[in-house]
Amino acid sequence: MINQENTPSVWKLPEPTLRRLPWYLAFVKLLKGKGEIYVSSTQIAKEINVDSSQVAKDLSFVNVSGKTRVGYEIETLIAVLEDFLGFTIQHKTFLFGVGSLGAALLQDSGLKQYGLEIVAGFDIRRELEGTTVNGIPVFHISEFPARQKTLDATIGIITVPVDQAQDVADHLVAEGVRALWNFTPCRIRVPENVVVQNTSIYAHLAVMFNRLGFINP
Amino acid sequence: MINQENTPSVWKLPEPTLRRLPWYLAFVKLLKGKGEIYVSSTQIAKEINVDSSQVAKDLSFVNVSGKTRVGYEIETLIAVLEDFLGFTIQHKTFLFGVGSLGAALLQDSGLKQYGLEIVAGFDIRRELEGTTVNGIPVFHISEFPARQKTLDATIGIITVPVDQAQDVADHLVAEGVRALWNFTPCRIRVPENVVVQNTSIYAHLAVMFNRLGFINP
């Protein structure tokens, strides 16, 4: 699911590191808001509940260096992390399936702050055609190829019912969408040069309920 | 973060299994909609892109048995899985931080189908007091202890800004909330008998952008 030919060095970054870096960023931005100038990896480690050596190792992937005793300059660290994580570029995105979860994601303006710009939603339901959610237009799915020609979205969010996920994924890939953010429980299959990120928020509920001890195995 | 005293056998269930079971459930429900009567672990494995022996192993944790050659009875498998995963019980939930992501989650009626019933939202902003989102009332945070006394929520969703996450978590735990679904990048600390599930959807963006090759390390 990862294109290993074009940019091999990129893939050396472990996924856990990539998931932790946004946590560090959030914490460091918070310190900036409090007027702090420097932050140490020990400070980050303590706040995020990660081992301090892990923080230093994670940050070693990023082009930033700390000063002995004072640590990293906060302003620089934020700029470098935001750039490194791709949050400073707006990635044009289409969302497929304007149901409950899909509409909720259209509502979440926070995504834009992280570089994800949803420019249109698509649905098979004719009654949604021409409506907007949070200012984002909703089109009938049949309009997707034409809209893709003019808007050239890089990313497709999939929030359709599970039985339509593979069809929609195939459709998106055929039209040149290069990354799929899949919120359905379907494990979609894509060519090697297409990126897939699966986010099953309902699966997290199962873990939480189980840990709560509601289940008697 | 897990209470190991009360129900030790529950924790034997590996988290990856718990995250896969909802995928199987979604697929099997889809088959039911198509009028199918039986499903084999091979069929599930093929659809979900998981190893067939893994599916059989995952399902061995659930109290359900397949028949040789025909597989699992779909109707039974759905009922057993939904029950096992805790989706058939409504878990009363409060949401803290009715910002962009918080309001989006209030909009997502899909959560209720999975057993999560958000009964109220709380925010520090006075102007949100008395409003509703998707029919769910929003209260000022100061009303939380009183509302908790009458509503007795088991779960708290945390969608506040990162610098308020720990304070809110402490507040919830003090009022008897037993599980926290944390959407902030803060790694909140809680007593051992409180369950925490972290869902950093923005961290998934970092992984996707990186894999897309936007980053030049």
Image: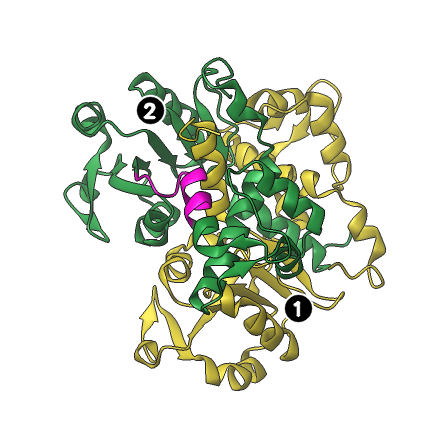
Chain colours: A green, B yellow
- Residue occupying the point 50% across, 57% down: A28
- Residue occupying the point 38% across, 20% down: A170
Which percent across, then down, holds residue B102? 41, 61
Viewer-nearest residue: A179 or A184? A179
- Dot 1 lies on which element? loop
Q: Amino acid at mark 2?
A: Val
Q: Quadrant of residue B28?
A: top right
- Residue occupying the point 21% across, 23% down: A145
Viewer-nearest residue: A120 or A100? A120
Chain on which label 2 sits: A
Residue neighbourhood size for the residue with mark 2, other residues' Cα within 10 Å, grouped as few (<14), some (14–19), many (≥20) = many
Viewer-nearest residue: A69 or A3? A69
Q: Which residues are magenta?
A: A79-90
**Residue A34, relative to residue B78: is it above or below?**
below
In the image, residue A202 lies in the stretch drawn in magenta? no
A193 with respect to B2 (left or right): left
**Residue A37, relative to residue B10: is it above or below?**
below
Chain on which label 1 sits: B
Residue A177: image tag: 2
B114 with respect to A79 (left or right): right
Q: Quadrant of residue A161?
A: top left
Which residue is situated farthest in the top direction here?
A: A5
A165 with respect to A203 (left or right): left
**Residue A126, relative to residue B177: is it above or below?**
above
Q: Amino acid at mark 1?
A: Arg
Residue neighbourhood size for the residue with mark 1, other residues' Cα within 10 Å, grouped as few (<14), some (14–19), many (≥20) = some
Residue B178: image tag: 1
Which percent across, then down, holds residue B117? 50, 63
B160 with respect to A215 (left or right): left
Q: Quadrant of residue A162?
A: top left
Which residue is situated farthest in the front direction here?
A: A68
